[in-house]
């Protein structure tokens, strides 16, 4: 293999070229706004990215303790490590050190993004400069690495996992470090410590490359003592850093389900999975390509596919170059290990399982810790990149023609990925504003009176359900603890604590400094004794049921807090009989709501003016506004997508002019009803009902029914 040794000046210039290319590509894709450390709104309502940000918010607010990554105010009272909120511990540690001087709104995720791109560009340029001195070629190849679909796919989704420069850095050490000295030990230790404070999956990939390096080192020098010293020193530092970061704080099974489901498909390299403007998606195993094997996304891009074909042809025509003391053994180890791990014990091609083989329980247990095994192919992915460019740049093709071919294929790559690039630019090149859905004045008053927020049970508020984000943001900003959150691994003690709290409430026991929040209204039937207790405030705020000990807070139960008078179980058909002539009835649905709706219920809905038979539209979105004040014919809509309806004060509402502002959203997992700016919908699975009393000019009742089973629903009478 022909390699070039550069002078210090050339080394620096080519490093700078890679760094600047990384910064330029980042700004081209994501724009400048994300680099503002005080701009945090873009991090909310963003799935896993919100998880990362909220982990940092609680971590920065808590005192230092050991392990360093643990905060006790999130996942209260058990606590959680920021390792399990994927909050990029390395950056979190650095910025917590200067927490006293940071502004109230602060984020480092944009900074992490551009640093990752710069370092990706740096190590890509350092790797490719070994085969060419042509800076145009170095730039072209570096941009290929910067446009890596697998890296862009992760950036600001699973943000820490976008640090692919760690993999390139490991490959750089693998290919360039040949001396047996203390510098080798130090460099690998630094890389392992960096990787473990970024993400566990990146650490495993670096470790595999490191083991490949040890194999090569031993085969070349036969120095078992040095290899052992290198292995022990790195292992010890890696384990210590993991311990200090809080990896071992979760006192429950770290094994996750889904091994095989989140694997790589054998067609992954040429399967765009929505990323190509030219190629059709190929089938994957599962319901669809986004169900599980999205974790094995490895699309090369059309430009790289053409270059792969060219490199294969050149290898066939020109043969394989033999080289004494090459690094083939370690490379083969990396290739086979990553390939086997990424495919999982269930090897798939398209929609078919080719092989499914048993593994020992202890192997399966370790493998399941890294259940998203499709990610583990990334070292092979980048080795393939390197092999492609090595074959082309070391072929008999004229260097200028090779440069032209690589440049043209880079344009093809951009063309192929143009849809995704345009989507990124459209999403990130403008500012967004986040408004916390907790708009009731209750929360403003409660912040200074209570210390803890208890979401019960926690599983009702975290993905695939929604809700924890608003409370986590509110709690972090008001120095309150929160018992629940979206964690990569959840300590079983968190659920046990929640169950203890629910049992305590059923027995009539409450903590005076805690706010109890419920999303499942059926649980409220168990707390009627506390609801009637004058020392307890109970009611609705922003669609959630709230209970807390009464505090001397003045307006806390009078502004934006709808006090509950009574709770009872009732059937939908029985409830519809209770509708009186002076009621306006609002109906919205959440998820598939009407599978088992009885004929009696449908007939009673017709009597109230509702013409649509919901059973004929199972799985569709629906809302209805009916009752005698509206008229004989209700206001209804049904569709496959999410429905919205706004009626402003003074506009017609059936037979009369509306005296209230109304905004309805209905469909999928959303059931929302705002009346005069206040949320009233219970947003439960199934049929959600709100009654507005024209005589009292207020909402007097809300109710929810799981009409998919026609189980008894929950009726809430408001004071």
Image (tube, grey):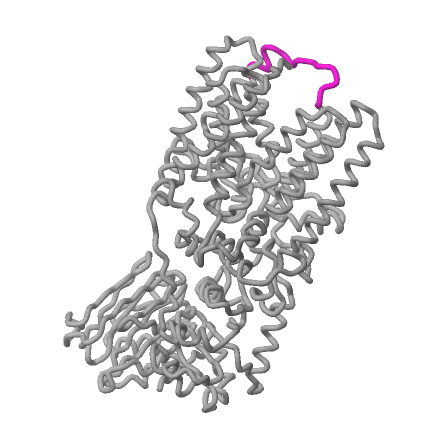
Residue at the far front: name it. 101
Quadrant of res 600:
bottom left
Counting from the top left corner in percent of width and height, residue 623 is at 29, 67
In the displayed structure image, the side of residue 660 where residue 22 appears, left or right? right
Image quadrant where one finds the N terminus: top right
Image quadrant where one finds the C terminus: bottom left
Counting from the top left corner in percent of width and height, residue 283 is at 49, 40
User: In this figure, what is the number of numbered marks?
Assistant: 0
Magenta region, main secondary structure? loop
Q: Is residue 365 magenta?
A: no
Q: Is residue 317 magenta?
A: yes
Residue 466 seen in render = no
Counting from the top left corner in percent of width and height, residue 136 is at 46, 18
Q: Is residue 10 above or below residue 63?
A: above
Q: Nearer the viewer, residue 454 or 316?
A: 454
Q: Nearer the viewer, residue 708 or 563?
A: 563
Q: Is residue 500 above or below residue 474?
A: below
Residue 204 seen in render = yes
Counting from the top left corner in percent of width and height, residue 704 is at 40, 75
Quadrant of res 324:
top right
Q: Nearer the viewer, residue 48 or 62?
A: 62
In the displayed structure image, the side of residue 254 where residue 515 appears, left or right? left
The residue range painted magenta reads 313-327
Q: Residue at x 30, y 61 (%)?
A: 643
Q: Residue at x 17, y 73 (%)?
A: 654
């Amino acid at each position: 293999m022909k390699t070039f040794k550069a002078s210090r000046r050339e080394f620096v210039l080519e490093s700078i070229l890679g760094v600047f290319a990384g910064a330029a590509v980042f700004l081209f894709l994501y724009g400048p706004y994300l680099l503002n450390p005080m701009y945090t709104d873009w991090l909310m309502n963003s799935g896993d990215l919100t998880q990362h940000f909220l982990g940092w918010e609680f971590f920065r607010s808590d005192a230092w303790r050991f392990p360093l990554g643990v905060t006790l105010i999130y996942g209260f009272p058990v606590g959680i490590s920021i390792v399990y909120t994927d909050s990029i511990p390395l950056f979190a540690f650095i910025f917590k050190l200067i927490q006293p001087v940071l502004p109230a709104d602060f984020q480092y995720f944009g900074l992490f993004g551009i640093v990752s791109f710069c370092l990706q560009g740096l190590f890509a340029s350092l790797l490719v400069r070994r085969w060419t001195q042509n800076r145009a070629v170095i730039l072209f190849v570096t941009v290929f690495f910067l446009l890596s679909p697998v890296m862009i796919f992760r950036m600001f989704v699973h943000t820490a996992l976008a640090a692919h420069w760690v993999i390139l850095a490991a490959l750089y050490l693998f290919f360039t470090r040949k001396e047996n000295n203390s510098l080798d030990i130090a460099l690998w230790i630094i890389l392992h410590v960096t990787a473990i404070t970024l993400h566990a999956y990146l650490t495993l990939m670096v470790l595999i490359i490191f083991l490949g390096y040890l194999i090569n080192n031993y085969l070349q020098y036969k120095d078992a003592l040095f290899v052992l010293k290198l292995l022990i020193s790195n292992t010890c530092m890696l384990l210590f850093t993991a311990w200090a970061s809080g990896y071992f704080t979760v006192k429950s099974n770290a094994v996750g389900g889904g091994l095989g489901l989140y694997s790589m498909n054998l067609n992954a390299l040429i399967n765009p999975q929505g990323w190509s403007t030219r190629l059709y998606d190929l089938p994957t195993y599962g319901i669809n390509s986004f169900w599980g094997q999205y974790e094995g996304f490895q699309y090369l891009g059309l430009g790289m596919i053409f270059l792969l074909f060219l490199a294969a042809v050149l290898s066939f025509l020109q043969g394989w170059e033999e080289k004494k003391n090459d690094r083939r053994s370690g490379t083969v180890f990396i290739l086979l290990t990553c390939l086997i791990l990424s495919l999982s014990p269930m090897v798939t091609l398209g929609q078919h399982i080719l092989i499914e083989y048993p593994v020992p329980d202890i192997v399966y247990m370790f493998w399941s810790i890294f259940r998203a095994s499709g990610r583990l192919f990334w070292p092979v992915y980048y080795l393939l990149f390197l092999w492609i460019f090595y074959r082309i740049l070391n072929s008999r093709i004229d260097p200028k023609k090779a440069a032209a071919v690589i440049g043209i294929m880079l344009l093809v790559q951009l063309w192929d990925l143009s849809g995704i690039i345009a989507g990124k630019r459209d999403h990130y090149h403008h500012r967004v504003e986040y408004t916390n859905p907790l708009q009731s004045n209750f929360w403003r008053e409660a912040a200074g009176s209570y210390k803890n927020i208890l979401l019960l049970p926690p599983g009702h508020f975290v993905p695939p359900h929604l809700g924890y984000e608003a409370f986590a943001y509110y709690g972090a900003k008001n120095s309150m603890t929160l018992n629940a959150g979206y964690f990569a691994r959840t300590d079983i003690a968190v659920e046990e604590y929640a169950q203890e709290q629910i049992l305590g409430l059923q027995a009539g026991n409450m903590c005076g400094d805690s706010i109890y929040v419920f999303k499942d209204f059926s649980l409220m039937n168990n707390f009627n004794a506390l609801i009637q207790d004058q020392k307890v405030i109970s009611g609705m705020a922003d669609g959630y049921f709230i209970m807390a000990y009464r505090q001397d807070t003045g307006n806390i139960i009078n502004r934006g807090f709808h006090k509950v008078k009574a709770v009872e179980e009732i059937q939908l058909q029985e409830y519809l009989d209770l509708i009186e002539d002076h009621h306006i009835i609002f109906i919205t649905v959440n998820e598939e709501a009407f599978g088992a709706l009885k004929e009696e219920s449908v007939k009673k809905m017709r009597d109230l003016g509702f013409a649509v038979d919901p059973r004929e539209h199972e799985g569709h979105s629906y809302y209805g506004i009916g009752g005698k004040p509206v008229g004989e014919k209700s206001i209804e809509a049904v569709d496959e997508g999410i429905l919205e309806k706004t009626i402003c004060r003074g506009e017609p509402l059936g037979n009369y002019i509306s005296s209230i502002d109304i905004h309805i959203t209905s469909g999928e997992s959303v059931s929302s009803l705002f009346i005069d700016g206040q949320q009233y919908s219970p947003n439960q699975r199934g049929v959600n009902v709100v009654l507005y009393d024209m005589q009292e000019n207020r909402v007097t009742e809300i109710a929810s029914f799981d009409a998919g089973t026609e189980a008894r629903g929950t009726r809430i009478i408001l004071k």
